[in-house]
Amino acid sequence: MDNTEYKKVFDFIKSEVLKHDPVGLIDGGAPEDEYDTEIGKLIGELPKIEKDEQKYYEIIVKVFRDIGKLNEKNCKALADILYNGL
């Protein structure tokens, strides 16, 4: 993936992560770059797995669970969006 494509994918995932706020950090007042490390991890992990919505959900849980209490509904919605949008 070249830099232009990476930025496009990063920006798409970031906009969806900010909307769905899987751990509630943004709603709690955190800056918009709070999830940038986790977004990078998603970009690294998602292409390695079979395209399956449940597997996308599992990767999202794996990436975000260590930074706070997950909102499972938001994680499932994020998995659906990423599955259909990537």
Image: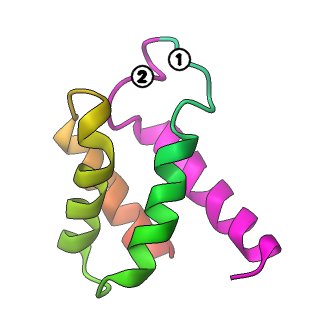
Q: Which mark is residue 30?
A: 1
The residue drawn where x is 50% and y is 72% is 85
Q: Nearer the viewer, residue 4 or 19?
A: 4
Highlighted magenta segment, given as a residue range: 1-28
Helix, strand or loop for disc 1: loop
The residue drawn where x is 64% and y is 59% is 10
Up-down relation of residue 31 to residue 70 (above or below): above
Up-down relation of residue 20 to residue 76 (above or below): above
Q: How is the image coloured?
A: rainbow
Comes first in the chain, label 2 or label 1: 2
Queried whether the magenta region covers residue 67, the answer comes back as no
What is the CA distance from the residue labelled 2 to the residue labelled 1?
A: 5 Å
Q: Nearer the viewer, residue 13 or 63?
A: 63
Task: Check the image and name the residue furthest to the bottom.
Answer: 50
Location of residue 6 by image quarter: bottom right
Task: Check the image and name the residue furthest to the right.
Answer: 4
- Neighbour class for label 2 at 10 Å: few (<14), some, many (≥20)? some
Q: Position of residue 55 (x, y in %)?
A: 21, 72
Queried whether the magenta region covers residue 6, the answer comes back as yes
Helix, strand or loop for disc 2: loop
- Neighbour class for label 1 at 10 Å: few (<14), some, many (≥20)? few
| Residue bearing mark 2 | 25
Q: Position of residue 52 (x, y in %)?
A: 25, 81
Question: Amino acid under label 1?
Answer: Ala
Question: Amino acid under label 2?
Answer: Leu
Residue contact at pointers 2 and 1, CB within 8 angstroms: yes
Up-down relation of residue 35 to residue 48 (above or below): above
Location of residue 45 by image quarter: bottom left
Q: Position of residue 49 (x, y in %)?
A: 31, 82
* Left or right, 30 with reference to 62: right
* Left or right, 70 with reference to 80: left
